[in-house]
Amino acid sequence: MQNLSYLIIKASRHLKNKLDKALMEFDITAAQFSVIIQIHYSDAPITAAEISKLLGSDRPTISGIINRLQKKGIVLKVANPNDKRSSYLEICKEYNKLVDKMKTVSDELTIDIFSIYSNEEAEKFTEMICKLNEGTEE
């Protein structure tokens, strides 16, 4: 049997590379997209620390991504009235429609990639990956 962890990591890398290529038209990376999505679809104001926790990534990495998105004019930092040391993050208004287009590109890529599975296989695979994520969270 091949090493399952290695296979999952390899597949993840391939998926990320495909998403990077698909998002090139928007001049963003898959990592930047994951941060944008967390901000865009958050029900409440969100901080970099919260995004870091949600994505399972370290704070310096997320801060670097946010700084690049801020330089591109996609993300705004807004003062957090409850904590002067942190800021809430927002997507600039003119990018909201673009975020929806990015999400559509990502969704279409996902559908295309996972079309090799039947609906039942895809549902079971999703269930298994969610269980794996829950079991490996720190």
Image (cartoon, helix red, strand yellow):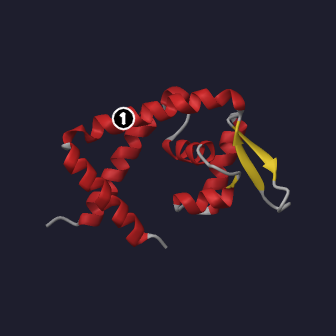
Is 103 left, or right, of 107 in this rendering? right
Q: Is residue 119 above or below residue 135?
A: above
- Direction left: furthest residue: 1
Rendered residue at 29%/61% (across/down):
128
Q: Quadrant of residue 20?
A: top left
Rendered residue at 39%/42% (across/down):
17
Is 4 left, or right, of 29 in this rendering? left
Q: Amino acid at mark 1?
A: Leu
Residue 23 at x, y percent in the picture: 48, 33
Residue 14 at x, y percent in the picture: 34, 46
Q: Is residue 92 above or below residue 65?
A: above
The residue pinned by badge 1 equals 109
Rendered residue at 66%/47% (across/down):
66
Asked whether 35 or 28 is in front, the reply is: 35
Asked whether 126 or 24 is in front, the reply is: 126
Count every numbered label the image shows and give the total: 1
Is 90 left, or right, of 124 in this rendering? right
Asked whether 130 or 20 is in front, the reply is: 130
In what quadrant of the picture does the N terminus appear? bottom left
Q: Secondary structure at mark 1?
A: helix
Q: Quadrant of residue 3?
A: bottom left
Q: Is residue 110 above or below residue 52?
A: above
Q: Is residue 44 above or below residue 90?
A: below
Label 1 neighbour load within 10 Å: few <14, some 14-19, many 20+ = some
Rendered residue at 60%/27% (across/down):
97
Residue 72 at x, y percent in the picture: 68, 34
